Image (spheres, rainbow, N blue to C red):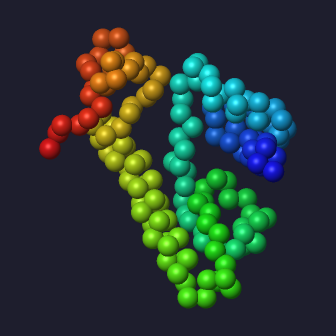
Amino acid sequence: MMAKALKRNAPERCRWFELGPKTPDNQMAHEHVIARASSIFEPRPELNHFNNLYCIVGRRSLTRDLFLDRRALLHSSDPNTDVQGDILVKIMSASIPVCGSINLEYLISRLDNSVYGAGTKLSHNVIGLLGVTNDVVDDLRALVNHRK
């Protein structure tokens, strides 16, 4: 079941890869995703949540036939099995901080990329697990920010 889901999801993921195949062929896209995950020659990140726009909490039937373009965080919840709303409270208690932190992650790195962001990974060099340089002549950027 999981292998089938991964193959069906691969063409959608490939749409967001600059160098990914733009094909509806599940097998070809899945092979690209697998190869990309272990390739040291693929310096561009997948950017994970950068395009998340909203969170939907409800029955799977609400979103089953919708094309959400990987922009939604989806949580299953059924009011018939959670009459008091205890499960819904737990889902929302987790979802709100996660959604907020995802948005802050991208906002803050854009506001002051040299302090909070990573810049481009195309020229990063890890130095002694202490930090990174942006090229061979750049100053060391420590992994811990000591700025107050």
**Residue placed at 33% from the left, 18% from the top?**
128
Query: In the image shown, does 86 or 69 lie closer to the viewer?
Result: 86
Q: Is 127 left, or right, of 53 in this rendering?
A: left
Q: Position of residue 33 (x, y in %)?
A: 70, 33
Where residue 102 appears, as percent x and y from the top left, is 45, 53
Q: Residue furthest left?
A: 148
Q: Is residue 133 left or right of residue 98?
A: left
Q: Quadrant of residue 34?
A: top right
- For image coordinates 72% across by 69% down, the residue present is 60
Q: Is residue 31 visible?
A: yes
Tell which residue pokes out farthest to the bottom in this image: 83
**Is 126 on the left or on the right of 80, as rendered?**
left
> In the image, what residue occupies the spot 76% across and 72% down?
61
**How many marks can you see?**
0
- Image coords of residue 111 (percent x, y): 32, 45
The image shows residue 112 at horizontal and vertical percentages of: 29, 41
Could one spot residue 8 in this view of the protein? Answer: no
Q: Residue at x 38, y 53 (%)?
A: 104
Q: Up-down: is 125 above or below 21?
A: above
In which quadrant of the rendered image does the C terminus lie?
Answer: top left
Q: Vertically, is 11 above or below 61?
A: above
Snapshot quadrant of residue 85: bottom right
11 above or below 92?
A: above
